[in-house]
Amino acid sequence: FKFDRCFGQNSTQTDVFEEVKNFVQSALDGYNVSLLAYGQTGAGKTHTMIGGGGDHQGIIPRSIEQVEKRRTRRWEYTLHASCLEIYNESIRDLLCDPKDLEGKSYTIRQGENGLMSVTDLMSVLVCTREDIHKLMTTSEKHRTVKGTDMNERSSRSHTVFQVSIPSHIPFSRVLHGSLNLVDLAGSERLAKSNATAGDRLKETQSINKSLSALGDVFTSISQKKSHVPFRNSKLTFLLQPCFSGDGKALVIFALSPSETSTHESLCTLRFSSLISQCELG
Ligand SMILES: Nc1ncnc2c1ncn2[C@@H]1O[C@H](COP(=O)(O)OP(=O)(O)OP(=O)(O)O)[C@@H](O)[C@H]1O
Protein backbone atom coordinates (compact mmCIF):
# COMPACT_ATOMS: atom_id res chain seq x y z
CA PHE A 1 0.00 0.00 0.00
CA LYS A 2 1.18 3.48 -0.80
CA PHE A 3 0.43 6.37 1.55
CA ASP A 4 0.85 10.10 1.32
CA ARG A 5 1.73 10.23 5.03
CA CYS A 6 1.95 7.78 7.93
CA PHE A 7 1.76 8.72 11.60
CA GLY A 8 2.98 6.34 14.31
CA GLN A 9 1.84 5.75 17.85
CA ASN A 10 3.81 8.70 19.21
CA SER A 11 2.37 11.20 16.76
CA THR A 12 0.32 14.01 18.16
CA GLN A 13 -2.72 15.66 16.69
CA THR A 14 -0.49 18.67 16.04
CA ASP A 15 1.65 16.52 13.69
CA VAL A 16 -1.45 15.39 11.84
CA PHE A 17 -2.88 18.89 11.74
CA GLU A 18 0.28 20.39 10.23
CA GLU A 19 -0.46 18.18 7.23
CA VAL A 20 -4.08 19.22 6.82
CA LYS A 21 -3.77 22.96 7.53
CA ASN A 22 -3.39 24.16 3.93
CA PHE A 23 -5.96 21.69 2.76
CA VAL A 24 -8.76 23.06 4.93
CA GLN A 25 -7.90 26.64 3.98
CA SER A 26 -8.83 26.01 0.36
CA ALA A 27 -12.47 26.27 1.50
CA LEU A 28 -11.78 30.03 1.63
CA ASP A 29 -10.86 29.98 -2.05
CA GLY A 30 -14.32 28.69 -2.97
CA TYR A 31 -13.68 24.94 -2.91
CA ASN A 32 -16.05 22.44 -1.33
CA VAL A 33 -13.66 20.69 0.95
CA SER A 34 -14.25 17.50 2.89
CA LEU A 35 -12.09 15.72 5.39
CA LEU A 36 -13.19 12.31 6.58
CA ALA A 37 -11.95 9.94 9.28
CA TYR A 38 -12.36 6.26 8.37
CA GLY A 39 -11.55 3.08 10.29
CA GLN A 40 -12.86 0.36 12.57
CA THR A 41 -14.45 1.07 15.93
CA GLY A 42 -12.04 2.14 18.66
CA ALA A 43 -9.22 2.95 16.19
CA GLY A 44 -9.25 6.67 17.06
CA LYS A 45 -11.46 8.48 14.53
CA THR A 46 -13.32 10.60 17.10
CA HIS A 47 -10.09 11.17 19.04
CA THR A 48 -8.52 12.53 15.83
CA MET A 49 -11.48 14.63 14.70
CA ILE A 50 -12.85 15.97 17.99
CA GLY A 51 -10.08 15.23 20.51
CA GLY A 52 -10.03 16.60 24.05
CA GLY A 53 -9.27 19.92 25.69
CA GLY A 54 -6.12 22.11 25.56
CA ASP A 55 -3.30 20.69 23.42
CA HIS A 56 -5.42 17.63 22.63
CA GLN A 57 -7.92 19.43 20.43
CA GLY A 58 -8.93 17.49 17.36
CA ILE A 59 -9.01 18.43 13.71
CA ILE A 60 -12.54 19.90 13.75
CA PRO A 61 -11.94 22.73 16.28
CA ARG A 62 -8.44 23.36 14.89
CA SER A 63 -9.70 23.59 11.30
CA ILE A 64 -12.48 26.03 12.11
CA GLU A 65 -10.00 28.12 14.13
CA GLN A 66 -7.50 28.02 11.27
CA VAL A 67 -10.01 29.24 8.72
CA GLU A 68 -11.26 31.94 11.09
CA LYS A 69 -7.66 33.17 11.64
CA ARG A 70 -7.12 34.00 7.98
CA ARG A 71 -9.66 36.80 8.05
CA THR A 72 -8.19 40.10 6.88
CA ARG A 73 -9.70 43.51 6.48
CA ARG A 74 -9.57 43.26 2.69
CA TRP A 75 -11.01 39.78 2.47
CA GLU A 76 -14.38 39.57 4.10
CA TYR A 77 -16.08 36.32 4.91
CA THR A 78 -18.36 34.81 7.49
CA LEU A 79 -18.43 31.30 8.91
CA HIS A 80 -21.81 29.65 9.39
CA ALA A 81 -21.53 26.32 11.15
CA SER A 82 -23.96 23.48 11.53
CA CYS A 83 -23.60 19.96 12.79
CA LEU A 84 -25.65 16.90 11.96
CA GLU A 85 -25.50 13.17 12.37
CA ILE A 86 -26.74 10.52 9.98
CA TYR A 87 -28.19 7.76 12.12
CA ASN A 88 -29.92 4.79 10.46
CA GLU A 89 -30.15 6.88 7.26
CA SER A 90 -32.00 9.70 9.05
CA ILE A 91 -30.58 13.15 9.65
CA ARG A 92 -30.57 14.70 13.13
CA ASP A 93 -29.53 18.22 14.01
CA LEU A 94 -26.88 18.01 16.72
CA LEU A 95 -27.15 21.71 17.60
CA CYS A 96 -30.85 21.41 18.31
CA ASP A 97 -32.10 20.34 21.72
CA PRO A 98 -33.69 16.84 21.34
CA LYS A 99 -36.85 18.28 23.00
CA ASP A 100 -37.25 20.67 20.05
CA LEU A 101 -36.80 18.10 17.27
CA GLU A 102 -40.52 17.40 16.92
CA GLY A 103 -42.01 18.75 13.71
CA LYS A 104 -38.63 19.27 12.06
CA SER A 105 -37.96 17.62 8.74
CA TYR A 106 -34.39 17.22 7.61
CA THR A 107 -34.21 16.78 3.84
CA ILE A 108 -31.18 17.27 1.63
CA ARG A 109 -31.85 19.70 -1.21
CA GLN A 110 -29.58 20.48 -4.11
CA GLY A 111 -29.56 24.17 -5.04
CA GLU A 112 -29.23 25.62 -8.54
CA ASN A 113 -25.54 26.24 -7.86
CA GLY A 114 -25.10 22.49 -7.20
CA LEU A 115 -24.56 23.03 -3.47
CA MET A 116 -26.44 20.97 -0.90
CA SER A 117 -28.51 22.30 1.95
CA VAL A 118 -30.44 20.52 4.67
CA THR A 119 -33.90 21.91 5.43
CA ASP A 120 -34.62 23.00 9.02
CA LEU A 121 -30.95 22.61 10.05
CA MET A 122 -29.74 25.11 12.63
CA SER A 123 -26.80 27.25 11.55
CA VAL A 124 -24.75 29.47 13.86
CA LEU A 125 -22.36 32.29 13.14
CA VAL A 126 -18.86 31.48 14.36
CA CYS A 127 -16.62 34.43 15.25
CA THR A 128 -14.52 33.44 18.25
CA ARG A 129 -12.75 30.46 19.78
CA GLU A 130 -15.50 30.35 22.43
CA ASP A 131 -18.15 29.98 19.70
CA ILE A 132 -16.30 26.93 18.39
CA HIS A 133 -16.09 25.35 21.85
CA LYS A 134 -19.76 25.95 22.50
CA LEU A 135 -20.58 24.30 19.20
CA MET A 136 -18.43 21.27 19.98
CA THR A 137 -19.87 20.84 23.48
CA THR A 138 -23.47 21.02 22.28
CA SER A 139 -22.98 18.55 19.44
CA GLU A 140 -20.98 16.15 21.62
CA LYS A 141 -23.85 16.10 24.12
CA HIS A 142 -26.41 15.20 21.44
CA ARG A 143 -24.45 12.56 19.43
CA THR A 144 -25.61 8.93 19.40
CA VAL A 145 -22.95 6.94 21.25
CA LYS A 146 -23.33 3.43 22.68
CA GLY A 147 -21.05 0.94 24.38
CA THR A 148 -19.85 -1.98 22.22
CA ASP A 149 -17.29 -4.74 22.90
CA MET A 150 -14.68 -2.60 21.14
CA ASN A 151 -15.34 0.92 22.45
CA GLU A 152 -17.33 2.02 25.47
CA ARG A 153 -18.29 5.27 23.71
CA SER A 154 -18.73 4.10 20.15
CA SER A 155 -20.21 6.54 17.59
CA ARG A 156 -23.17 4.80 16.00
CA SER A 157 -23.68 7.45 13.34
CA HIS A 158 -21.74 9.58 10.87
CA THR A 159 -21.18 13.06 12.29
CA VAL A 160 -20.81 15.91 9.82
CA PHE A 161 -19.59 19.39 10.83
CA GLN A 162 -20.38 21.79 8.04
CA VAL A 163 -19.03 25.28 7.73
CA SER A 164 -20.28 27.35 4.83
CA ILE A 165 -18.03 30.24 3.93
CA PRO A 166 -19.42 32.94 1.67
CA SER A 167 -16.48 35.26 1.01
CA HIS A 168 -16.37 38.57 -0.80
CA ILE A 169 -13.20 39.35 -2.68
CA PRO A 170 -12.93 43.14 -3.16
CA PHE A 171 -14.04 44.24 -6.65
CA SER A 172 -14.65 40.63 -7.58
CA ARG A 173 -17.21 37.88 -7.20
CA VAL A 174 -18.59 36.16 -4.12
CA LEU A 175 -17.20 32.69 -3.47
CA HIS A 176 -19.18 29.94 -1.80
CA GLY A 177 -16.70 27.51 -0.29
CA SER A 178 -17.56 24.95 2.34
CA LEU A 179 -15.75 22.79 4.83
CA ASN A 180 -17.22 19.39 5.72
CA LEU A 181 -15.52 17.57 8.57
CA VAL A 182 -16.77 14.03 8.93
CA ASP A 183 -16.30 11.55 11.75
CA LEU A 184 -17.52 8.32 10.14
CA ALA A 185 -19.07 5.49 12.12
CA GLY A 186 -16.87 2.39 12.55
CA SER A 187 -16.25 0.11 9.58
CA GLU A 188 -15.94 -3.16 11.56
CA ARG A 189 -17.75 -6.46 10.93
CA LEU A 190 -20.91 -7.22 12.91
CA ALA A 191 -19.38 -10.02 14.98
CA LYS A 192 -16.39 -7.89 15.95
CA SER A 193 -18.41 -5.32 17.87
CA ASN A 194 -20.87 -7.99 19.06
CA ALA A 195 -23.69 -5.92 17.58
CA THR A 196 -25.72 -8.98 16.73
CA ALA A 197 -29.27 -8.15 17.84
CA GLY A 198 -31.90 -5.43 18.19
CA ASP A 199 -31.14 -1.75 17.69
CA ARG A 200 -27.39 -2.31 17.65
CA LEU A 201 -27.70 -4.77 14.75
CA LYS A 202 -29.89 -2.35 12.78
CA GLU A 203 -27.39 0.47 13.42
CA THR A 204 -24.42 -1.60 12.30
CA GLN A 205 -26.21 -2.78 9.15
CA SER A 206 -27.12 0.79 8.31
CA ILE A 207 -23.52 1.94 8.91
CA ASN A 208 -22.15 -0.85 6.68
CA LYS A 209 -24.66 0.00 3.93
CA SER A 210 -23.73 3.67 3.85
CA LEU A 211 -19.97 2.94 3.98
CA SER A 212 -20.46 0.55 1.11
CA ALA A 213 -22.29 3.35 -0.80
CA LEU A 214 -19.25 5.57 -0.10
CA GLY A 215 -17.02 2.81 -1.52
CA ASP A 216 -19.22 2.56 -4.63
CA VAL A 217 -18.88 6.31 -5.20
CA PHE A 218 -15.08 6.11 -4.99
CA THR A 219 -15.02 3.02 -7.23
CA SER A 220 -17.04 4.86 -9.91
CA ILE A 221 -14.81 7.95 -9.62
CA SER A 222 -11.62 5.88 -9.83
CA GLN A 223 -12.97 4.13 -12.94
CA LYS A 224 -14.01 7.53 -14.39
CA LYS A 225 -17.56 6.29 -14.94
CA SER A 226 -20.08 8.78 -16.35
CA HIS A 227 -22.60 7.92 -13.61
CA VAL A 228 -21.53 8.15 -9.97
CA PRO A 229 -24.16 6.77 -7.53
CA PHE A 230 -24.17 9.75 -5.14
CA ARG A 231 -27.87 9.32 -4.35
CA ASN A 232 -27.55 5.84 -2.87
CA SER A 233 -26.98 7.17 0.65
CA LYS A 234 -27.58 10.41 2.57
CA LEU A 235 -23.86 10.72 3.29
CA THR A 236 -22.71 10.54 -0.34
CA PHE A 237 -25.57 12.77 -1.55
CA LEU A 238 -24.66 15.42 1.06
CA LEU A 239 -20.97 15.27 0.17
CA GLN A 240 -21.50 15.19 -3.61
CA PRO A 241 -20.12 18.75 -4.16
CA CYS A 242 -16.90 17.71 -2.36
CA PHE A 243 -16.42 14.67 -4.59
CA SER A 244 -16.99 16.41 -7.92
CA GLY A 245 -16.44 19.74 -9.70
CA ASP A 246 -14.83 22.22 -7.29
CA GLY A 247 -14.45 19.51 -4.68
CA LYS A 248 -11.49 18.43 -2.63
CA ALA A 249 -11.44 15.40 -0.34
CA LEU A 250 -8.91 14.08 2.13
CA VAL A 251 -9.37 10.92 4.16
CA ILE A 252 -7.56 10.03 7.36
CA PHE A 253 -7.40 6.28 8.03
CA ALA A 254 -7.28 5.16 11.64
CA LEU A 255 -5.80 1.70 12.26
CA SER A 256 -5.72 -0.35 15.44
CA PRO A 257 -2.26 -1.70 16.32
CA SER A 258 -3.76 -4.89 17.79
CA GLU A 259 -3.16 -8.20 16.02
CA THR A 260 -6.77 -9.29 16.53
CA SER A 261 -7.78 -6.36 14.29
CA THR A 262 -5.73 -7.57 11.30
CA HIS A 263 -8.80 -8.30 9.17
CA GLU A 264 -10.33 -4.85 9.83
CA SER A 265 -6.96 -3.15 9.26
CA LEU A 266 -6.58 -4.88 5.88
CA CYS A 267 -10.10 -3.79 4.88
CA THR A 268 -9.23 -0.21 5.89
CA LEU A 269 -6.01 -0.35 3.85
CA ARG A 270 -7.87 -1.71 0.81
CA PHE A 271 -10.33 1.17 1.09
CA SER A 272 -7.43 3.65 1.28
CA SER A 273 -5.89 2.06 -1.78
CA LEU A 274 -9.14 2.55 -3.70
CA ILE A 275 -9.36 6.21 -2.67
CA SER A 276 -5.78 6.96 -3.68
CA GLN A 277 -6.76 6.02 -7.25
CA CYS A 278 -9.45 8.75 -7.41
CA GLU A 279 -8.99 12.02 -9.24
CA LEU A 280 -11.50 14.78 -8.52
CA GLY A 281 -12.09 17.44 -11.14
N1 LIG B 1 -3.96 8.48 19.56
C1 LIG B 1 -4.62 8.27 20.71
N2 LIG B 1 -4.09 8.66 21.89
C2 LIG B 1 -4.76 8.46 23.05
N3 LIG B 1 -5.99 7.89 23.16
C3 LIG B 1 -6.56 7.49 22.01
C4 LIG B 1 -5.92 7.66 20.72
N4 LIG B 1 -6.73 7.16 19.79
C5 LIG B 1 -7.84 6.70 20.44
N5 LIG B 1 -7.72 6.90 21.77
C6 LIG B 1 -8.70 6.50 22.79
O1 LIG B 1 -9.25 5.24 22.42
C7 LIG B 1 -10.66 5.20 22.64
C8 LIG B 1 -11.39 4.91 21.34
O2 LIG B 1 -11.12 5.96 20.42
P1 LIG B 1 -12.24 6.67 19.54
O3 LIG B 1 -13.53 6.83 20.29
O4 LIG B 1 -11.64 7.90 18.93
O5 LIG B 1 -12.46 5.55 18.42
P2 LIG B 1 -13.38 5.60 17.12
O6 LIG B 1 -12.53 5.13 15.98
O7 LIG B 1 -14.02 6.93 16.97
O8 LIG B 1 -14.45 4.49 17.47
P3 LIG B 1 -16.03 4.37 17.05
O9 LIG B 1 -16.08 4.09 15.58
O10 LIG B 1 -16.51 3.20 17.86
O11 LIG B 1 -16.67 5.64 17.46
C9 LIG B 1 -11.05 6.55 23.25
O12 LIG B 1 -11.10 6.43 24.64
C10 LIG B 1 -9.90 7.47 22.82
O13 LIG B 1 -9.72 8.53 23.73
Image (cartoon, rainbow, N blue to C red):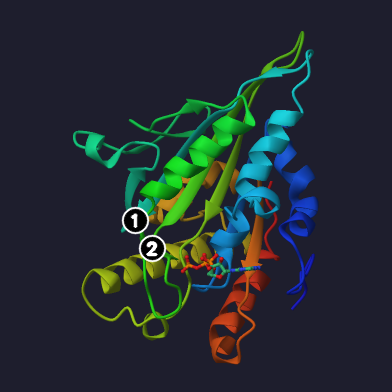
User: Quick one: 215 or 103, which is closer to the camera?
Assistant: 103
Residue 259 lies in what quarter of the image?
Answer: bottom right
Few, some or many residues within 10 Å of mark 1 (<14, 14–19, 20+): many
User: Hey, what amino acid is under mark 2?
Assistant: Arg
Which is nearer the N-term, disc 2 or disc 1?
1
- Give x and y (percent) for residue 60: 61, 46
Query: Does residue 108 lie above or below 37 as drawn?
Result: above
Q: Residue furthest top?
A: 171
Judged from the image, the secondary structure of the residue bearing numbered disc 2 is: loop
Horizontally, residue 182 falls left or right of residue 8, namely left
Foreground: disc 2 or disc 1: 2
Q: Tell me what residue is drawn at x 77 percent, y 67 percent.
A: 11
Horizontally, residue 250 falls left or right of residue 120, namely right
User: Hey, what amino acid is under mark 1?
Assistant: Tyr
- Kindly identify which residue carries mark 1: 87
Query: Does residue 74 lie above or below 107 as drawn?
Result: above
- Kindly identify which residue carries mark 2: 156
Q: CA distance from mark 2 to mark 1?
A: 7 Å
Q: Decide: marks 2, 1 in contact (CB < 8 A)?
A: yes
Can residue 83 be seen by looking at this rendering? yes
